[in-house]
Image (cartoon, rainbow, N blue to C red):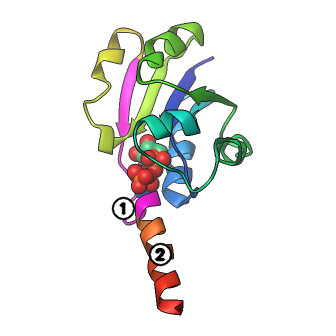
Amino acid sequence: MKRVITYGTFDLFHIGHLNLLERLAELGDHLTVAVSTDEFNLGKGKVCSMPYDERSRIVGALRCVDRVIQEESWDQKPRDVQELGIDVFGIGDDWQGKFDHLAQYCEVVYLTRTHGISTTSLKLDIAMNADARK
Ligand code: CTP
C-alpha cells in the first residue's frame, strides 16, 4: 500500500483545498492529512475562523481522506513519515523547496495551487461584504 501525507490549516474549507486533497489521494492508496491545531496556529500568530475540531471533521469527512492527525509542531514531520510508513509527502507549491529535507525519508512532491482562491482572500471577501452592508 502506498501512503501519502500532507499538512495544512484548512480553515474556511474551499475548492483549492479539495483539488489538492483529491490530487494527493491519486498519488497513492491511503491519504493522511495532518490538520494544524489551534495552539500551533496561535504560536504562528494565526487565528482561525473555524476551530480545530470543525476543520478536522470536515477534512476527515471527505471521500479522498483516510485519516486525520494533529499537526502540533514544525518538526514532527520526519517522525510522522517514519512512524506512519509514509511513501509520499505532498503539499501545495507555495511551499516549493521548503520540505526537500524530507526526501531522505520519502518522496516529496509540490503540487500546483488552484489559482484565485485562498482562506486569506475568502476572509477579505467576507469582511468587505460585511462592511458594504453597514
Ligand atoms: N492550497 C492549494 N490551492 C489553493 C489554496 C491552498 O492547493 N488555492 C493548498 C496549500 O498549498 C496547502 C493546502 O492547500 O498545501 C492547505 O493550505 P492552507 O494554508 O490551509 O490554505 P490557504 O487557502 O493557502 O490559506 P491561507 O490563505 O491562510 O494561507
| Quarter the N terminus occupies | top right
- What x and y, as percent, mark residue 71? 54, 28
Residue ID at (29%, 22%): 100
Residue ID at (57%, 45%): 22
Marks 2/1: CA–CA distance: 21 Å
User: Image quarter for residue 29?
Assistant: top right
Q: Name the residue beneath numbered marker 1.
A: 115
- Find the magenta span and give its range: 107-120
Mark 2 or 1: the one toward you: 2
Label 1 Cα neighbours within 10 Å, binned few <14 / some 14-19 / many ≥20: few
CB atoms of marks 2 and 1 within 8 Å: no
Does the stretch in magenta take in 40?
A: no
**Residue 48 appears in the rendering:** yes
- Say whether residue 70 is left or right of residue 90: right
Amino acid type of the residue tagged 2 in the rendering:
Ala
- What x and y, as percent, mark residue 18? 56, 52
Does the stretch in magenta take in 112?
A: yes
Task: For mark 1, give the secondary structure.
Answer: loop
**Residue 26 appears in the rendering:** no
Residue found farthest to the left: 97
Q: Earlier in the sequence, mark 2 or mark 1?
A: 1
Residue ID at (50%, 17%): 87
Amino acid type of the residue tagged 1 in the rendering:
His
Q: Name the residue beneath numbered marker 2.
A: 127
